[in-house]
Each structure stands twice: as C-alpha cells, then as structure tokens.
Amino acid sequence: MRYLSLIFILFFLMTGCSSKNISTPHTKKSIIATEQNSTQTSEDDEFDDEFDDETKEVFDPLEGYNRVMTNINDKIYLYAFNPISKGYAFVVPKPVRVGVSNAFDNLKFPIRFVNNILQLKFDHSIKELGRFMVNSTVGVLGLFDVATKAGIKRYDEDFGQTLGYWGVGSGFHIVLPFLGPSNLRDTIGLAVDTAISPRTKSGLEYQIPKNNLESLGYASLYYTNKNSLHLGEYENLKKDALDVYTFFRDAYEQKRAKEISE
Amino acid sequence: MLKRTILIVLLLCSSLFAVEEGNIKSEMESKIATITQILQNKSLSLESKKEQIAPTVDNLFDYKTMAKISLGRVWKKLSSSQQEQFTKKFEQKLKNSYFEKLELYTDQKVVVKELEKPKANRIYLHSEIIGTEESYEVIYKFYKVKNSNDWKIYDVDITGVSIIQTYRKQFSEFLKTKSFDELLASL
C-alpha cells in the first residue's frame, strides 16, 4: 500500500515536471536569450515571448475540490479568522506583534538552515546560523531582529523550494484547508518542514510543544499574529480577481517559480 | 484651494518629462519619494492623497500596451473601437486597483535598487518595499517606445507575480466561456 502511494506521487511529480517546464524561469530566460540574438520581431508579437501562452491549459485535476476549498477558506477567513485577528490586533500593540513575529521567524531557523544546505547555498546557511545566534541572544530569544538591522538578511528557503531546486515539478495545484493555495510538491515540502520545525511536535529534542494541543496553540498564535500584521490584504487582492480561485492559483504558482529560481 | 491647484500643476509639470534611459532611476526615485511623502502626510484625506498621486504616475505607464498584452491573441481580433474601449476600461481597472493598494500603506519604505537591461529595448528597475517584518521585491518593467527615446512601463512584477501575466490568464479563462462584451462589463 505504501509503495502504491509512493508510485502515485512519483507519477504526478513527473507529469508535473513535463507540463510545468514551459513556464519555468530557466526556459523563459533562454527564450529571451535567443530572442536577443535574432533581430527584433514584428511589433505585434514583441511582448508575447515574455509572457506565458494564455491559452495553455493548466493541469488541474483537483479543480472541483480546490474551488470548494477556496470557498470554504474564504468564509473561514472572513467570518472567523479575520475578526479574531482584528480583535487580537486591537488588544496587542503593534511592536509586541512584530516581536512575536520575529520570534517565530527566528524559530524557523532549522528549516532555513537545512534547506539552504540542501540547495548547496552554504554561504547562506552560515549567515542563517549567524543570524540565529545573534537574534537568540542579543535579540532576546528572537523578539528583536537585530541581525537584519545590522544588514544580515534572512534567506528564506523551504523544502518545497529544495525539491524545485533539484528539478521536481510543482505537480498539480492543491488548496489546503486553512492554509490556502499550495501544490503537490509544496504540500510534501510543508510536511517535511513541519516535521523539523521547533514549534511543532514530532519527537525531536529541540521542539518546544510538549503535546499536540500545545503545538496547535503555537500554530494558532503564529497565524493569528501574522495575519494581524497583514489585515485587509486578502480582501484587497481579491478585488483584482475575475475568478478568485484561478487568480490565487496562478499568483501562487508564479510566486513559487520565482522563489525557486532565486 | 489655490494652494492645491498650484501643487497639482507642479506635480503635472514634473511628470511631463519623458522618462529616458539615462534618467529612469533618478526619475523613479523622485516619483517614489513624492508618492511616499504624500502617503505619509497625515493631514491629507485618502481622497486627496489619490488626487495628488495620480498625475505623478500617469504618463509612466503605457496602458494600451498593457491592455494589448493582457488580452493576448484576442486583441488582434478586435475592431479598433473595441480595442479603445477595452484599453479605457482596463486603464481604469488598473488605476482603481493601484489606488486600493495605496490604502494598505502604513509606514513602509520603498528603496530603488539596481537597473537590469535584459535586452536592448527593455529595462527592469528593481525596488523593494520594506515593511516592519517583511519586505517585497517589486520590479518595474520598461520598454523603449519605437522611434523615440521614451521608456514606458508595460508590466509590474511583485514578489515574482507579474500583474499583466495574471490578468492575461484571467481574461483568457473568462473568454473561454463568456463573450468580449461580458468581459468589458465585468471590468
């Protein structure tokens, strides 16, 4: 049974690879490069090489489910999560929320550290180690991001990006409950990152929560706090969409392709 | 009232200069500085902020080219009056969307970074919006207007998401099941 699901996943990752190729930044770059050599194309098609073929079908076998889940997430967000975050923002002053956000970001250090190494970005992982040491001590357990102020920036990498770095395609799009847009590759990535995250419980020594309930508590605080610093953004973006589901799906896939190319 | 008129005239004048290759960075830096200043002015209402910002950005964007790219293949099938109608609607849509985004502004800083020239008639201006706990990379994509020294923006890329690419996909999906007139009405 386990093998069967493994084969299933591999199959979709591979089909993901082949269908995703057209829009990976690497091929895009080579198109631009070849265009540079040739003389200017006719004015009409001048820009077409820089943009994806709009008629290209997106491989989206879960579309039916995804649309339903997008709708459910939208309602959860607007009627539960957003009011809670607003209340939280009203009670907790902004500098404290920024501090909490910094502390959580600092706790994500193992994820960034490991994934930078897995992508052979050793200089970045060393800088991440430096950031963690400085922010955990001088920055009072990560509440203050003194490293960024000193000019050492954060190098966000996750396991989804690591898979992408090694050529694994995005697979198909999946809208996760509560968490929103993702795809097969990034869902696997998320599972791996969650397993090594200090704010979850999977049996590792350094993990903070003692049980699943505490782990849920940390997750709730993390997302509520994060959202309280980004109030109104979702509603604002949603207004740009003709079709909310495909809008967020395409935006998500574009953003991830860019993050992986960096 | 008079003060405001003078200010608007001044802003209009400052934006009348065509953006040329040599001054893309400095022009954008000064425009962004102007806009940030207006946004940070607490004595202004949101409406008057928008009024003052509008002329600063107006002749920076090539709305017709943006409209053309966003429609892809469909563009050529349209009559010139339909193209014009669409361009007008799309311009309004982009402006509304832009002004709505300004409502989210709190205290972010915008830093203009480097220029990139991927080919002879393209320049990308990289910039960064720096917030309290997160920063966003924004790329303004300029192209050289044919037979002139003017450079105009044809796309803006925010954290890897191209605005025009996103509209292009949205419009194409929409037109699969609905008509062009319905698209016009929905903008």
Image (cartoon, coloured by chain):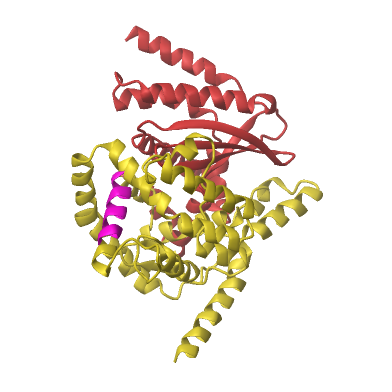
Q: Position of residue B144 (x, y in %)?
A: 68, 35
Visual hue assigned to chain A: yellow
- Residue drawn 77% across and 54% down? A34
**A161 or A249: nearer the viewer:** A161
Using residue A190 as the reference point, say whether residue B66 is left or right of it: right
* Residue located at (49% from left, 39% from top): A148
Position of residue A230 measured from the top left corner of the image (x, y, whole percent): 33, 44
Magenta region, residue range:
A217-230
Query: Residue B47: percent from the left, percent from the top?
Result: 31, 26
> Relative to B149, does residue A200 appear above or below in the rendering?
below
Q: Is residue A211 above or below residue A102?
A: below
Residue for point 35% across, 64% down = A200
Task: Tell me how many marks there are.
Answer: 0
- Image position, residue B86 (x, y; %): 47, 45
Q: Nearer the viewer, residue B79 or A105?
A: A105
- Image colour assigned to chain B: red
Residue drawn where x is 67% and y is 34% of the image: B145
